[in-house]
Amino acid sequence: MRITVSGLPGSGTTSLSRYLSERHGFSMISAGEVFRQLAREHRMGLAEFGSLARENPEFDKMIDARQKEIAAGRDNIIVEGRLSGWMVTDADIRIWLFAPIACRIKRIVFRDQIADEKSAERITIEREECEAARYRSYYNIDINDLSIYQIILNSEHWNVEGLGAIIDTAIMQLNPPEIR
């Protein structure tokens, strides 16, 4: 089974992906973690690294191609990232998580250790705009087109276990246990 988990920054995609990976024993690939690692390696913030990536498409294309390649060669995998639903064309379940900006900003401040919500909001909006432009430019993908997703959830309303329970049910419907 191949599952993609996508959403805007702070929507909970990494938390849900980790939950599903641990619960079902699936491997996990996270584009966001790879992107953050590259930003750290270049000693840059996410917005600054996003600007660099806009100037040099090879960063994004390398991450996207790697996700696609790994997912194609494995079964029982969770592929997490903004474009994973678009990149993993043979996914069994494509999930999009969303949450209001205020909720996402609170999470981002905590996760990324940003000093204040105003700064986090500015950085996040810049990042989202930069990414959306890059996806349109590289792949002609409109990140706001959610028509490819089978499951769309508002992560503000449930904790990771609640979100996981919903997805666990979907997994069971697609892959029921054998009747003995």
Image (spheres, helix red, strand yellow):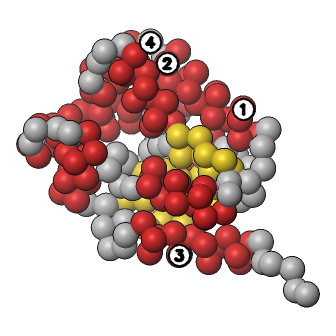
Residue at the image point whose x is 29% and y is 18% from the top: 44
Q: Dot 2: within a 10 Å radius of its alpha carbon, few (fewer than 14), some, or many (20 or more) residues?
A: some
Label 1, on which residue?
Answer: 69
Label 3, on which residue?
Answer: 165
Are the residues tagged 2 and 4 within 8 Å (C-beta)?
yes
Real-space CA distance between mark 2 and mark 3, rounded to the nearest whole angstrom:
35 Å
Residue type highlighted by circle 4: Asn
Quadrant where the image shows the C terminus: bottom right
The percent position of residue 75, horizontal first and vertical second, equals 78, 50
Real-space CA distance between mark 4 and mark 1, rounded to the nearest whole angstrom:
21 Å
The front one of 47 and 40 is: 40
The front one of 93 and 177 is: 177
Assign a secondary structure to mark 1.
Answer: helix
**Looking at the image, can residue 113 be seen?**
yes
Q: Nearer the viewer, mark 3 or mark 4?
A: 3
Q: Dot 1: within a 10 Å radius of its alpha carbon, few (fewer than 14), some, or many (20 or more) residues?
A: few
Label 2, on which residue?
Answer: 59
Query: Which mark, by number, is residue 56?
Result: 4
Assign a secondary structure to mark 4.
Answer: loop
Residue type highlighted by circle 1: Glu
Real-space CA distance between mark 3 and mark 4, rounded to the nearest whole angstrom:
40 Å
Nearest to N terminus: mark 2 or mark 3: 2
Real-space CA distance between mark 2 and mark 4, rounded to the nearest whole angstrom:
6 Å
Are the residues tagged 1 and 3 within 8 Å (C-beta)?
no
Q: Is residue 170 above or below residue 27?
A: below
